[in-house]
């Protein structure tokens, strides 16, 4: 009994300490994003290459998923709406569910699977190879050069890719609505615009930004925690990805609380 | 040149030297490897791009010129694992000399150039970039003196 309480206590303290150190590091990186010195030529080169790896290279897979998913969801939504005869709810369903909930969620899963794991492994390998200490020897600030461009890329990529995903789904919806209901394009767009709430859109952008921030920051932290041994790399990536998915769930829940309460 | 009897002594003196010259330090050491996911030119360009905010294009031009000066233009796009020992050393040396008013420290250069018998290659390289270096210091073991053409019983 005592050992059970002991392990619960240890788990609580470890979790508290881990969340505390993550948030403290997050605050440091966040504040550094507003410092002009962080945007030098070297950091901007890293930022551009990160945008290319995260937002451009993923496009074929991303658009394929968006089209397949859009066709599937739109098919189900339109069929459901038609069955219950509540066409007034079409816009609300597409904007309130697909655009604000599903698009950011699918996007963050795809980006996390691809980029978070890559960032985690990259930082861990750099740590093991003494490349991080090399940068420090040459007076290169790790936060300015390595972390800010990656985190900023996470935020920008998430907002852009999520918007692109929504656009793809809505475009397919336009096609499906004209086939199923024979709706004109302007009537469909008008329905969507009437259903769009500015507050919801602001919350979605904030949610995407928070997703982007944490799915790049957490892999960095876990990569930095790797020891000097090669065997610590897979452990760092594994732990990083588990924490990334925990963060995604937490942000999703928090944004839903803000939106619906 | 500074020669030391033991690893501990060398490391201690090197640490002190690095701390004293931190702002202008250009270290060439097996303990300070090239960044493996960057090509050679980016590894070198990183220094002026970060510290002097030099544009990508200007940095590229400068690094190409320096690589050409050492006869190493062909390694610009190569990454660390693809380099020979000499090429790696040249890249690390150039990364050190592009530090503004560089105090270049060569830490046990033969631990990188393990295939070389003497310091001719090293001295030849230093001559070629002499105008870019404010100071150059070599830290090595006493038993390696002869490789630099220094008599074994000579003072440091």
Image (cartoon, rainbow, N blue to C red):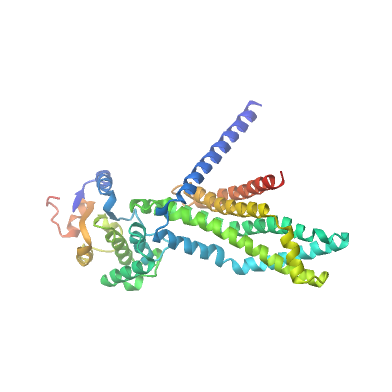
Q: Position of residue A132 (x, y in %)?
A: 40, 52
Question: Which residue sits at x=63%, y=57%?
Answer: A109
- A124 relative position to A179: left or right: left
Q: Is residue B78 above or below residue A129?
A: below
- Give whichever of B115, B129 is nearer the camera: B129
**x 23%, y 52%: residue:** B139
Query: What x and y, as percent, mark residue A175?
Result: 75, 71
Tell me, yes or no, if residue A121 can be seen here: no
Left or right position of B113 against A127: left
> Which residue is pictured at 44% across the width and 55% down the height?
A146
Any part of residue A171 in sight: yes
With A200 as the anchor, is A53 left or right in this view?
A: left
The x, y position of residue A112, in whole percent, is: 59, 56
Image quadrant for the C terminus of chain A?
A: top right
Quadrant in the picture for the N terminus of chain A: top right
Name the one closer to the observer, A111 or A100: A100
Displayed quadrant of residue B76: bottom left
The residue located at (53%, 43%) in the rendering is A22
Total marks shown come to: 0
The residue nearer to you, when weighing B27 against A168, is A168
Which residue reaches farthest top?
Answer: A2
Relative image position of residue A50 (x, y in whole percent)? 50, 61
């Amino acid at each position: 009994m005592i050992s059970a309480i002991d392990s619960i206590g240890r788990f609580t303290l470890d979790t508290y300490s881990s969340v505390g150190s993550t948030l403290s590091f997050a605050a440091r990186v966040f504040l550094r994003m507003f410092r002009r010195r962080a945007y030098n030529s070297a950091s901007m080169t890293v930022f551009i290459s990160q945008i290319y790896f995260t937002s451009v290279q993923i496009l074929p897979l991303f658009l394929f998923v968006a089209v397949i998913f859009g066709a599937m969801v739109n098919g189900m939504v339109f069929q459901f709406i038609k069955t219950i005869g509540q066409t007034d709810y079409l816009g609300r369903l597409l904007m309130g569910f697909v655009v604000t909930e599903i698009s950011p969620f699918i996007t963050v899963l795809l980006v996390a699977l691809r980029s978070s794991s890559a960032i985690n492994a990259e930082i861990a390998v750099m740590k093991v190879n003494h490349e991080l200490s090399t940068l420090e020897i040459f007076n290169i600030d790790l936060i300015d050069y390595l972390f800010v461009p990656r985190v900023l890329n996470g935020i920008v990529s998430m907002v852009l890719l999520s918007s692109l995903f929504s656009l793809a789904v809505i475009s397919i919806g336009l096609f499906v609505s004209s086939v199923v209901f024979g709706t004109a394009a302007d009537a469909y767009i008008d329905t969507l615009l009437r259903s769009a709430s500015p507050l919801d859109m602001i919350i979605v952008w904030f949610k995407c930004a928070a997703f982007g921030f944490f799915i790049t920051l957490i892999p960095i932290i876990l990569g930095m925690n790797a020891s000097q041994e090669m065997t610590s790399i897979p452990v760092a990536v594994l732990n990083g990805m588990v924490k990334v998915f925990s963060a995604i769930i937490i942000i999703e829940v928090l944004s839903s609380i803000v939106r619906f309460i | 040149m500074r020669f030391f009897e033991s690893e501990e002594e060398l490391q201690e003196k090197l640490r002190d030297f690095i701390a004293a010259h931190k702002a202008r330090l250009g270290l060439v050491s097996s303990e300070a490897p090239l960044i493996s996911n960057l090509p050679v030119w980016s590894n070198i360009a990183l220094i002026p791009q970060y510290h002097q905010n030099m544009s990508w294009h200007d940095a590229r031009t400068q690094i190409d010129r320096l690589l050409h000066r050492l006869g190493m233009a062909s390694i610009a796009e190569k990454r660390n694992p693809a380099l020979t020992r000499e090429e790696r050393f040249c890249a690390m040396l150039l990364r050190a000399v592009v530090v503004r008013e560089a105090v270049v420290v060569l830490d046990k250069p033969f631990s990188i150039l393990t295939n070389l018998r003497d310091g001719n290659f090293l001295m030849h390289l230093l001559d070629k970039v002499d105008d870019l270096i404010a100071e150059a210091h070599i830290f090595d073991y006493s038993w390696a003196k002869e490789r630099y053409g220094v008599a074994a019983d000579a003072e440091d």
